[in-house]
Image: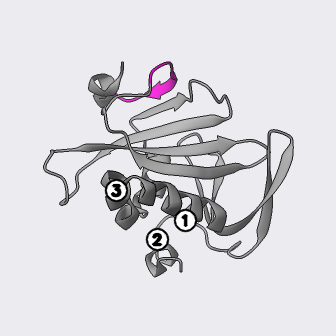
Amino acid sequence: MIDPGLYRLKNVDYSQRGEIVSIIVDGIVKPQTVIFSGVDYFGERYYFTEEGWRYIIDSRRKRFDHSFVLQHLDKIPVILKSPIIVARHPNIDSNYLFLKDTMFTESTRKKILLLVVLKKSNINVVWNYLWQEESKTPKGSEVIFRSRGAKKYLR
């Protein structure tokens, strides 16, 4: 069941909720059921889908130390709209990494670096959401954008 909080987010568009959009990944058409859409830092439309949500749930449950991010899915639109770093994935050119440092009550640290993977193809789809454990951009990433406060998170 989808967290009802996902249907009360600010600054996202629910007008396409339930519609099927298709993303092409490695030449394969993958249908996606829209939960909401939004606009990222670059002014491009992205979609958060039921299939993406299920993948995030499955992948975070496999990593118990990452499961706390599931209580903070509301941060995804914020990260995509105002990241501190945007980088291209080191191995998958169509995956863009949007990173933002955020405070959590669950954390003993001051800030945690969160990462949203946005798959860019014929449409942009949220592909994953996780905690960047090393608090650094992934090795080999090509940095496309960085804010002033990003320096400590760069390799």
Q: Which residues are magenta?
A: 139-147
Mark 3 or mark 2: which is in front?
Answer: 3
- Tell me which label, 3 or 1, sits earlier in the chain: 1
Quadrant of the rendering where the C terminus is positioned: top left
- Which residue is under mark 1? 12
- 3 and 1 marks in contact (CB < 8 Å): no
Q: Which of the pair 110/70 is nearer the observer?
A: 70
**CA separation, marks 3 and 1?**
29 Å
For residue 64, the mark is 3
- Which residue is under mark 2? 9
Q: Residue at (50%, 48%) from the top-left corner?
A: 80
What x and y, as percent, mark residue 118? 59, 44
- The answer to whether residue 140 is left or right of residue 99 is right
Mark 3 or mark 1: which is in front?
Answer: 3
| Amino acid type, residue under disc 2 in the picture | Leu
**CA separation, marks 2 and 1?**
6 Å
Q: Residue at (86%, 41%) from the top-left corner?
A: 27
